[in-house]
Amino acid sequence: MSAIKLRVDYDAARTRRLAARAKDPDQVRRLLALSAVYEGRS
């Protein structure tokens, strides 16, 4: 599996805030997964 670059203008806190406002459960899951990656999890 190859790595992808993350945007530098987002961070874990910002993606969590976006997830809190999102209405679509699939979008919430994806944003929380990105938040975890920004925090250094895999």
Image: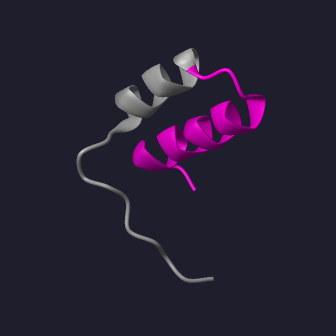
Name the residue furthest left: 9
In the image: residue 13, left or right of residue 26:
left
Locate residue 36, reporting x and y percent. Answer: 53, 41
Picture quarter containing residue 7?
bottom left
Name the residue furthest bottom: 2
Name which residue lies at 75% across and 38% down: 26
- Specify start and end residues of the magenta stretch as a single range: 22-42
Q: Nearer the viewer, residue 24 or 31?
A: 24
The number of callouts visible is 0
What's the coloring here?
A: one colour
Locate residue 29, reporting x and y percent. Answer: 69, 36
**Mostly what secondary structure, the magenta segment?**
helix
Name which residue lies at 44% across and 20% down: 17
In the image: residue 8, left or right of residue 27:
left
Picture quarter containing residue 1?
bottom right
Q: Which of 4 and 40 is in front in this view?
A: 4
Determine if the magenta segment contains residue 24: yes
Up the image or down, 25 lies above or below 40; here it is: above
Q: Which of 41 and 3 is in front in this view?
A: 3
Name the residue furthest right: 25
Q: Nearer the viewer, residue 5 or 41?
A: 5
Name the residue furthest front: 23
Name which residue lies at 38% across and 68% down: 5
Determine if the magenta segment contains residue 40: yes
Image quadrant containing the C terminus: bottom right
Locate residue 4, reporting x and y percent. Answer: 46, 72
